[in-house]
Structures are given as structure tokens and as C-alpha cells.
Amino acid sequence: MKKKIKSIKLDKLKFNTIEVILVFIMALVFGVLIGEMVFSGGRSTSSITTSTSSELYEIKDVYNTILSEYIDEVDKDKLKEAAINGMMSSLKDKHSVYFNEFEAEQFQDELNGYFIGLGVGVYKEKEELVTVREVYKNSPADKAGLQKKDQFLKINGEDVTKDTTEELAKKIKGKEGEKYTFLIKRGEETIEIKATTGKVDIPSVTYKTIEQGNKKIGYINLSIFANNTDEQLQETLKEIEQAGIKDLIIDLRYNQGGELETVLNVASEFLDKDTPIIRIKTKDKIDIRYSTGNKNSKYNITVLINRGSASASEVLAAALNEQLNAPLIGITTYGKGTVQKTKQLSNGTIIKYTIETWQTSKGKSIDGVGVKPTIELKQSSNYYDTLKEEDDVQLQKAIETILQ
């Protein structure tokens, strides 16, 4: 069974005063979280062909003029990226964006649910070394002996003490089977660790059992709707069924969305066949997508939401509330009621752009409004300092609601 955990934050949120960067790594899952996840009906991998239309004459003219006559040397790639960024920003849609090659690779990994690398999460505080936050179980990093709180000094003999997480990632990106030697600071010791890259599944489903009195409650955290999240959830539900657990808490806090087909598959694990999940609205029609499952009587579900719950997580929260009367506990969600599509360009970069809007299963629009909780409850400020379960007032309220 695939083990799972990962918490994702919206890039607009700030925690405390230290600069903490939580990342997925490309070679060491380093990378940078790239805003909101695409909520898409599919991704195109076709290349953009060269246009000879008259509309692009001025763009080509300016481009060539700068290259040939500008007084200083010009980076062609940066010039091209600036032009594309300009077109995307002119749409005045914060969900339509351009990802450079580095960002695009991370973005694709995030949605694919796996990457080629070592399998650790890291952060960096101001003026400190890049530090290991977590090591994925059974990953190449785990097998090599990397541990939490390890700090990176050198990679293949090169000093990385001044590096940001992104700079470090660029030095260790590679194909499967590439070998690295790390000089690590562990407490007061300095040690050398050798590791080889391999395929690492990005865990997006966390499960644990909460026992209160004589009742067992299943807690499921969904951090993103990647291509393999539904498969991970199916494995988790098998474990829950074997334990005979009927009460579930589904935590969608900080889940920024993901793939359309994935959230439909996840919702189908809890809803009867032919139950509406979402209404997708184009310019001239509304397409209603239905559950393909037959499982709505199996669980008593309570859902946790907050401002970081966006897009596909709002689809699931609304569907479970509208169709199963599942309580929603927390604060109003982000309010992202649009659908994006991605297109990969010939050089590996990606554009993400809005193509549709969506409504809840009962036809409510949430764009700019969000999904409102049935039990509104702000998180305790103390929880962000301790991260202890007993200080998580929203989770404790969900447990209390189930027990009642």
C-alpha cells in the first residue's frame, strides 16, 4: 500500500515571521509550490507552431530589433518568456499563467503524483542552511539514510550553504539512476551520504484512526487531487473497511485542487451512481458530471475546510454537503469557480488558461464567494505554533460533531 502525507499551503498565506519554504523536490523534491493547482479536463502536450499571421509581425519586428540593435547583450530565452508572460497577464485572470521550464516540470510532477528524485521535503529559514523537513518512507533518500533536520553543506563537492531551495534543486535534477554525494550537517556531526535517484510517488492521502471512548473515527487528509490520488484513496478505504470504521473526517484544508477526473473518482467513492457532482458551464451549455459509484450509505462523513481549500476541493466539499448532508466545519473556502486547461509548449514550458466555469451539484456558483461552512469555526492561533492535534479546534469540533 502506498503511504501518504503532504500538506500544501496557498502561496498567499503567511505563517509567523520566519520565511519557511515547504516544497516538493524534483531531485530532492525541492521545487517551489506554483500557486493554485490546475483544475482541468485534460492536458494537451502538442507544440505551438510558428505563426505567420500579420498580427504577429510587430512582435517579431520588436524581437529582432532588440536582438540586433540593443546596446547590451540580451538573453533570448528571457525575452521570449517576457513576451509570453505579457500576453498571459493581459488576460487579467490570475488563474491564467505561464510556467517556465523549471516551474512547469514541478507543476507536472505535482499533478502526476510522482517524480524522479530522492524523496525528501525541505525548508529554509532566513540565513540558515537548507534543512530536511521530512523523508518519504521507502524513498531513495530513506534508503540512503537521510533524516529529518539534516542540513546540506555540499553536493558532489560543491558548497551549497548559500543556496536557496530552488538553486539547490537545479543542481541535483536528473534522470533516474543518477548518483549524488551529500555532505550533511547532523547536529554537531558532519557526515557523507550517497544516494541514487529513482521514482518517488508523491503521497497525497494521509490516514489515521482517532479513538474517542469506544468509537473509532477514520481521519483522511487529501492534500491535492493528483492523477494517483484516487488510487491512494482506494487503498486507504480498503484499510478502513477492514477495520469496520463508519465515521470519517475528510480534511480538505489547504487543498488547492487538482485534476477534474480525479475529484470525480474520489467523490464517486462516497456517492451513489448517477448522483450529480458538478455542473460545468461553457458559453453555450451546461455539462453535468455524475458519480459512477454506489457507496453513499457506507460512511458518516464530516468535512474540514478553510480559506486554503480551492477548486477541486470545493467541488468535493460542496457535493458531499449537498448530496449527503455532510457537515462542513471551518471557514469559507477560497472561491475558485473556474476551470483551467494546460498546454505544453515545444520547449517544455506550460501555459495555463481558463476555459470554463463550474457550479456545485445543485447549481450554486462559488467563484469569488467560496463554499460556506455549516459550522463556522476559526482555527486557534496556538495551533500554528504547536501543530498538536489537541490544539486543532476545527478537528476537535469535527470529532465532537461525530460523537454527538
Image (cartoon, rainbow, N blue to C red):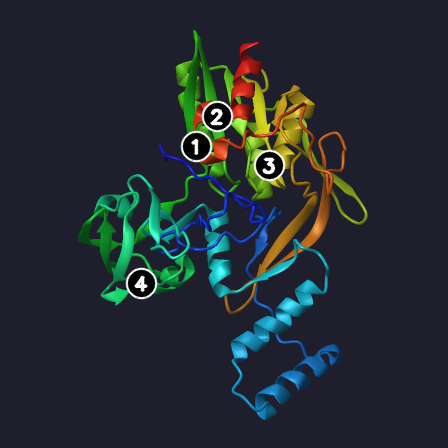
Q: Nearer the viewer, residue 294 or 159?
A: 159
Question: What amino acid is found at the position of numbered circle 4 in the picture?
Answer: Val
Q: Nearer the viewer, residue 264 or 366?
A: 366
Picture coordinates of residue 136 (x, y %)?
33, 41
Up the image or down, 148 lies above or below 69; here it is: above
The answer to which quarter of the image holds residue 147 is top left
Image position of 269 with respect to 282: above or below: above
Q: CA distance from mark 4 to mark 3?
A: 37 Å
The first of marks 2 and 1 along the sequence is 1
Pick whichever of labels 3 and 2 is earlier in the sequence.
3
Residue mark closest to the camera, 4 vs 2: 2
N-terminal of the pair, mark 4 or mark 1, is: 4
Q: Is residue 136 left or right of residue 52?
A: left
Cα distance in 3D space between marks 4 and 2: 37 Å
Rate crowding at label 1 as few (under 14), some (14 to 19) or many (20 or more) other CA atoms within 10 Å: few
Q: Which residue is mark 2?
A: 391
Residue 178 visible to the viewer: no
Quarter of the figure with residue 270? top right
**Residue drawn at the location 50% of the way across and 54% of the way down:** 107
Please give the residue where the numbered disc 1 appears in the rendered image: 386
C-beta proximity under 8 Å, tags 4 and 2: no
Q: Earlier in the sequence, mark 4 or mark 2?
A: 4
Residue 57 is marked as none
Query: Given the image, on which type of amino acid does mark 3 rest?
Result: Ser
In contact (CB < 8 Å): disc 3 and disc 2: no
Residue that label 3 marks: 313
In the image, what residue type sits under mark 1?
Thr
Q: Secondary structure at mark 2?
A: helix
Q: Residue placed at 64% from the left, 89% from the top? A: 65
Q: Is residue 225 left or right of residue 367?
A: left
Q: Residue 160's mark?
A: 4
